[in-house]
Amino acid sequence: MRHPQGITTSEGAALFRPTQARRTIMAMKINADECTACGDCAAECPNSAIMNKGAFFKINPDKCNECEGISEFQKCVDVCTAGCIVPA
Ligand code: SF4
Ligand code: SF4
């Protein structure tokens, strides 16, 4: 049987076979208590995933893909001098 994602199984059973070449993508998040609301991260985000919430900034987890395919590192983390952007 051909799995919807293109993986062939003998009995049609669900099959999940992660490869080492493909890491799990997670969203990043901002610790609001430590954020100085400088806005540097939002200016760097290629996915427009970072929103200004006034006293702090917030990452939309539906838009953040850790800069996968765009950068070797998370651009927001690289510019945040407060060090308050961490894995969600
Ligand atoms: S990790 Fe990349 S995509 Fe996610 S919020 Fe930061 S800059 Fe945007
Ligand atoms: S760069 Fe860091 S301190 Fe500045 S707004 Fe983004 S999360 Fe907050």
Image (tube, rainbow, N blue to C red):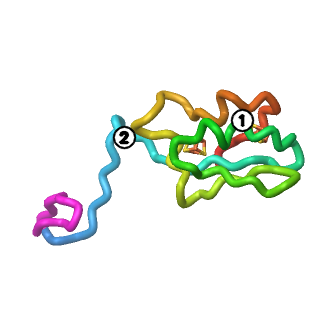
- Judged from the image, the secondary structure of the residue bearing numbered disc 2 is loop
The residue carrying mark 1 is 40
Separation of marks 2 and 1 at Cα, in angstroms: 29 Å
At label 2, the amino acid type is Arg
Q: Earlier in the sequence, mark 2 or mark 1?
A: 2
Q: Is residue 29 left or right of residue 5?
A: right
Q: How many marks?
A: 2
**Picture residue at 59% right of the left edge, 57% below the top:** 61
Foreground mark, 2 or 1?
A: 1
The residue carrying mark 2 is 22
**Picture residue at 43% right of the left edge, 41% below the top:** 23
Q: Position of residue 31 (x, y in %)?
A: 80, 47
Q: Quadrant of ligand 1?
A: top right
Compared with residue 75, is residue 63 higher up or lower down, i.e. above or below? below
| Whether the residue under disc 1 has CB within 8 Å of ligand 2 | yes
At label 1, the amino acid type is Asp
* Front residue (pair 4, 66): 66
Q: Position of residue 27 (x, y in %)?
A: 58, 50
**Picture residue at 21% right of the left edge, 67% below the top:** 4
Q: Main secondary structure of the magenta part?
A: loop
Q: Position of residue 66 (x, y in %)?
A: 53, 42
Highlighted magenta segment, given as a residue range: 1-10
* Magenta-span inclusion, residue 54: no
Q: Is residue 3 left or right of residue 83?
A: left
- Judged from the image, the secondary structure of the residue bearing numbered disc 1 is helix
* Front residue (pair 19, 25): 25
Compared with residue 33, is residue 79 higher up or lower down, i.e. above or below? above
